[in-house]
Amino acid sequence: MRLFQCRNYSLSVIITMIQTVAMFECLVLLPLLIQKVFNLNSIWTGIALFTTALSASLSLNLAAKFLDLQSPRNIVMFGLILSAIAIFSLGQLSTHPNNMLWLILLMILRGIGIGFSITPVTTAGLHHIEQRHLVEATAMHDLIRRIASSIAIIFVAIYLEVRSASFVQQGFPQLLSLHLSINEVFFVTSGLIVMTIPCAYLLTSKKQQHFSKFSTEHHHS
């Protein structure tokens, strides 16, 4: 538990956990949304997921360059805001076929959000851990991500089953019930991401910590 006494590490774990939940929820929801609700084939699902991975990879390299120039808080906050906007907007899409293009664009935006948040926030958290605890901190980070991914998949499966049945009982068609349930998960997920933005704001770089420490000592002297 001593690892979580480091503020940056604790904040990075919270942000990573929520982003991991969002990532795996999208992996579960997208095939259902595209293939069942939009009634398109699995190729479109592959295209949407590929564009997300590609944009995340490209933006990650860009985020790494920015990370050397400024505090991680701005980079991570930018990524979280993009992720929240993208996921919330996914919940606004209707079943019109032309919306598939918008879905792909939103997944590209989501990928950029991932690239600017997950790896930079992990780096920011681990940089504040002592070298002798680094292996333990990395292992704990990975463990929490695995747990978060499992929770996300279980939650989505149960929620869609229960909520869709509830909508059907209210007289909604089955496909519309599924669509409404998916949208609700997107809304909740975007809200969770928004709640982590203050955590990103509290992130500090080592330079900021040294400056703060120097200012305090100088003030007392």
Image: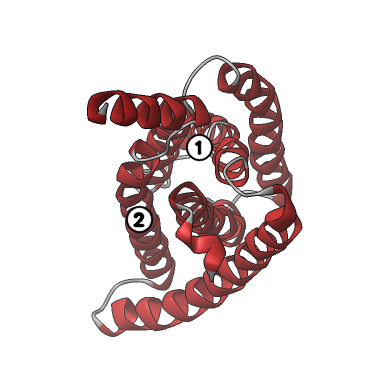
Image depth: mark 1 or mark 2 in front:
2
- Relative to the observer, which residue lies in front, 62 or 83? 62
- The spot of residue 4 in percent (x, y) is 50, 62
Q: Residue placed at 60% from the left, 18% from the top?
A: 68
Q: Residue placed at 56% from the left, 38% from the top?
A: 124
Q: Secondary structure at mark 2?
A: helix
- The spot of residue 214 in percent (x, y) is 38, 26
Q: Which residue is mark 2?
A: 192
Q: Residue placed at 40% from the left, 33% from the top?
A: 77
Q: Secondary structure at mark 1?
A: helix
Q: Which mark is residue 123?
A: none
Q: Is residue 171 left or right of residue 134?
A: left
Identify the coloring: secondary structure
- The spot of residue 10 in percent (x, y) is 47, 56
- Relative to the observer, which residue lies in front, 153 or 195? 195
Q: Which mark is residue 103?
A: 1
Q: As shown in the figure, which amino acid type bears the numbered disc 2?
A: Leu
Above or below residue 153? Residue 208 is: above
Q: Residues within 10 Å of mark 2 (few under 14, many from 20)?
A: some
Above or below residue 50? Residue 130 is: below
Q: As shown in the figure, which amino acid type bears the numbered disc 1?
A: Leu
